[in-house]
Amino acid sequence: MKGIVLLMVGIILLLLAAAGGWYAYNKFIAPPPDAAVGQAKAKPAPGPPPVYVRLAPFTVPAIGAERPEQLITFVIVLMVRDQSAESQVNDRMPRVMDTFLTTLYGAIDEGEMINGSLVDVAGVKKRLQAACDRLLGSDVVKEVLVQTVLQRRF
C-alpha cells in the first residue's frame, strides 16, 4: 500500500513539473502567436526561380618543377537570374569557356588554386565569379557553383 501511494505522489509531481516546464516555455521562450504572423507578412514575395547553365567540364594540368603533377577536372554550373540571362550566357558561351579556362590556368600558375595538395574551391569560385562579372556584367550570374572537383595525381 505504501508503494502505491509513493508511486501516485511521484506521478503527480512529474505531471506538475511537466506543466511548469510547458508554462515557462510558452511564457519566456516561444514567440507570441501575433509576432509569428507579423514576421510571415513581412517577408517579401520571392522572385522567379533562378536558372542554371551547365558548362562542359574543364580539365587543367597542375605542372610541377619538371613534369605535370596532377590533372584537375572541374564541373561548373552557373546560377543566373532568369531566362534572358541564360540566353545571354549561351550567346557568349565560347567566350565564357575561354575566360574560365584562362582563369583556371592562371590560378594554377600563380599557385593560388592549390592549397597543399588540395584545390581551394572557395578561391576558385571567387576568381570565376570575378571573371563572370567582368565578362557578362555583375547582374547576370548570381553564383558560380563548383559541383565536382576531381584530382588525379601522377
Image (cartoon, rainbow, N blue to C red):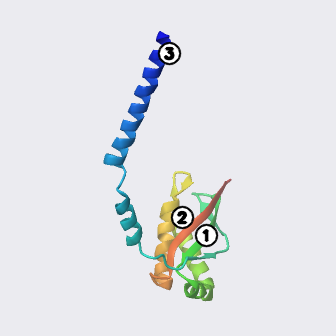
Seen in the image, is 80 located left or right of residue 71?
left
What is the quadrant of residue 90 in the picture?
A: bottom right
Q: Position of residue 121 (x, y in %)?
A: 53, 60
Q: Secondary structure beneath disc 3? A: helix
Q: Amino acid at mark 3?
A: Ile
Q: Secondary structure beneath disc 1? A: strand
Tell me if residue 74 comes above or below residue 102 in the rendering: above
Q: Residue furthest top?
A: 2
Q: Amino acid at mark 1?
A: Ile
Asked if the residue at tag 1 contacts the one at tag 2, i.e. Cβ–Cβ closer than 8 Å, the answer is no
Mark 1 crowdedness (10 Å alpha carbons): few <14, some 14-19, many ≥20: many
Asked if the residue at tag 1 contacts the one at tag 3, i.e. Cβ–Cβ closer than 8 Å, the answer is no
Which numbered circle lies on residue 76? 1
Tell me if residue 14 comes above or below residue 105 in the rendering: above
Which numbered circle lies on residue 4? 3
Report the mark closest to the observer, 2 or 1: 1
Depth check, front residue: 111 or 134: 134
Which residue is found at the position 35% from the left and 55% from the top? Answer: 31
- Disc on the earlier residue, 3 or 1: 3
Residue that numbered label 2 is attached to: 108
- Disc on the earlier residue, 2 or 1: 1
Seen in the image, is 71 located left or right of residue 100?
right
Depth check, front residue: 130 or 24: 24
Tell me if residue 91 comes above or below residue 61 in the rendering: below
Report the mark closest to the observer, 3 or 2: 3
Q: Secondary structure beneath disc 2? A: helix
Q: Position of residue 42 (x, y in %)?
A: 37, 71
Is residue 11 visible in this depiction of the protein? yes
What is the quadrant of residue 96 in the picture?
A: bottom right
